[in-house]
Image: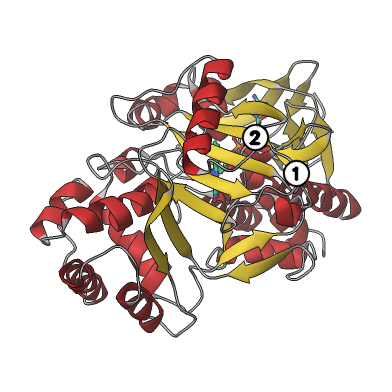
Amino acid sequence: MTQQHAVHIVGGGWAGLATAVQLCENGIPPLLIEASRQLGGTTRRIAFDGAPVEQSPVMLFAGYHHVMHLFRLLKIRENQHYIRIPFDIILRRKRRTKFRFRQHALPAPYGVISGLLLARGLSWSDKMAVLRLLRAVRGNSTRPEQDMPVNELLHQQKQGERAIRFFWRPLCRMFLHCDTQRASTLAFLDMLDWLFLSDQGNSDVLQLKTDIGGIFTDRAMDFIEQKGGAVKLGHQVTGLQVAGDRLLGLRTDDSELAADKVVLAAGAAGSAALLTDLVAMRDPLAAFAQLTFPALATVYVKYPRQTLLPSPLLHTMGTLGQWLVDKRLQGLPGTMAVHALEKPQQPLPQDDELLTMQIVTQLHVLFPHWRMPLTSQVARTPAALLAATVHYRQHQPAAATPITGLWLAGDFVRHGPLPSLESAVACGLACADAVANSVSDPTPP
Ligand SMILES: Cc1cc2nc3c(=O)[nH]c(=O)nc-3n(C[C@H](O)[C@H](O)[C@H](O)COP(=O)(O)OP(=O)(O)OC[C@H]3O[C@@H](n4cnc5c(N)ncnc54)[C@H](O)[C@@H]3O)c2cc1C
C-alpha cells in the first residue's frame, strides 16, 4: 500500500469536486477517485440526439453563494455561461395559464410583495393571506418548536385553496422535493427566508447559455490537475479499511491505498454502501435510512426547432411532468426537458416508453399547436434527490464522523440549507477546510 496524496476523495459529483478544488486552494492537492468514466455525478453529461445534455438538469439560483465561489475560482463567468432572470412561476393547465407570479427586481421584501400584488390567478384575499404569512416569516413569529408538515402551517395561517395550489405547492415541490403534506415546515420557512426575504437577487434564476454541468467538471478537473492533484476515473472504491475508530486505507477494484484522510462524497446510496460494515457508523446509518429519496425522471423531447415555450421555465398542473425547461438558450432549439417527480399515490411509470408517451400526450394538451416530437429520451437517477420531509434534518448524518480521518460530503449531509447543488458544494467546501485544519503542513497554493 502506498500513499502519495495526503487526502483521498471518493466520488466526483459536485460535492467531491468542490472538496477537491478547495483542498487545492488550501495547498493540499488530493487524489479523487470516481467510479464512472465521467465526472459530475447526477449531473454528468449524456448524449441526446448527438448533443450533450445533463443526466439530471441543472437549475441554479443567484443565491447559490457557494456555487458562485466555486465558479469564480474556475473562471466560469456570468454573461458567457449564464444570465440572470427574475424568478417566475407560470402555472399552466390544459391550454390556459392559471397563475403567474414574477419576482420584481427590488430590495427584499419589496420584490416579492410587488410580484404578489401583480400576480395573476389569485384573489385579493389570497394575496393578502400570502403576504401575511411572509411577514410572519420575516418577523420569525411562525417558527414552530417542533417540525410539522407544511400543510398544517398553511391551514393555521389561513391560506386559501388557490394560494396553496398555485403558489405554496409548486414552491414545496421545487425546493423541498415533496408535497405540502410531507414537507418540513422548518425547511419551508428557511426556504422562504432565503428565496424572498434575504439578499436582493437570491431568487434570480441563472438561465444557462452553455452545458454548465460539463463545463464545470472540465474546468474542475483541469484546476485539480494543474495544482498537483489527481483524478482517477473508472475506479470504484469497494471498501474502507478501519481499525477501531481510525481510518487506515481504501480498497479500489484494482488496488489498495493507504489513506488516513478520506472525504466520502459518493452520494447517499454510494456512501451508505461503503459505511454499512463499519461498527462506528451504525447509529448514523440507522438514522440515515429514514431519509426519503423520491423517484424523479427527466424526459428530453425534441420538437422541430421553431417550437418554443412561452418562458424558459414553465410549471404545469395536474400532469405527470411538472416543470418544463426550454433548452433553446443552450443551443438546442426545440428541445424540452420535462421533469417528473413522483407524487403521493402516483408513482412514475417504470417503463420508459409509457412515461414518454404520457408526457408527450400531456404536452400536446398544453400546446395543441406543437407538431409531433422528432425524438425523445428518458434519464432516471434512482435515489439521488433527498426530500426535505418533516424531521429530515434529525436523520441527516453530520459531515464529521466518529471515525478519525473520515468525513462525509454531499447534499444528504446535515450542512447548509436545502438539498441541492448548493448544499452539496457548501458541504464539500466545509469538509475541505476541516481536512485542511487537520493537516499539519500544506504546501503553498
Ligand atoms: C433529476 C434531478 C434533478 C436535479 N435538479 C437540480 C437542480 O435543478 N438544482 C439543484 O440545485 N439541484 C438539483 N438536483 C440535486 C443535485 O443534482 C444534487 O444535489 C447533487 O448532484 C448531489 O451531488 P453529490 O456530489 O453530493 O452526489 P452525486 O452527484 O450523486 O455524486 C456522487 C458521485 O460518487 C460516485 N461514486 C459513488 N460510489 C462510488 C464508489 N464506491 N467509488 C467511487 N465513486 C463512487 C458516483 O459515481 C457519483 O459520480 C437534482 C437531482 C436530480 C436527481
Identify which residue, 62 or 289, lies in the foreground.
62
Distance from label 1 to label 2 (Cα)? 42 Å
Name the quadrant containing residue 348: top left
Mark 1: amino acid: Ala
Amino acid marked by disc 2: Tyr
Of mark 1 and mark 2, the one earlier in the sequence is 1
Quadrant of picture, ligand 1: top right
Query: Going 51% across and 29% down the picture, which residue do you hit?
Result: 361
Q: Secondary structure at mark 2?
A: strand
Q: Secondary structure at mark 1?
A: loop
Where's residue 261, x and y in %? Answer: 65, 40
Callout 2 environment at 10 Å: few (<14), some (14 to 19), or many (20+)?
many
At 53% from the left edge and 69% from the top edge, which residue is drawn? Answer: 204
Instruction: Please state the horizontal and vertical placement of residue 206, each as a whole percent of the image.
Output: 62, 63
The structure residue drawn at horizontal position 66% and vertical position 40%, both measured from the top left corner, is 43
Depth check: give the residue in front, 10 or 304. Answer: 304
Q: On the image, numbered disc 2 is attached to which residue?
A: 300
Determine which residue is flagged by label 1: 6
Tell me if 204 is positioned left or right of 305 in this view.
left
Q: Is mark 1 within 8 Å of ligand 1?
A: no
Report if residue 13 is visible in the image: no
Which residue is drawn at the image coordinates 64% and 51% (left, top)? 308
Q: Is residue 66 left or right of residue 387?
A: right
Judged from this view, the residue extending furthest toward the right is 226
Image quarter of the C terminus: bottom right
> Which image quarter holds the N terminus?
top right
Q: Quadrant of residue 130?
A: bottom left
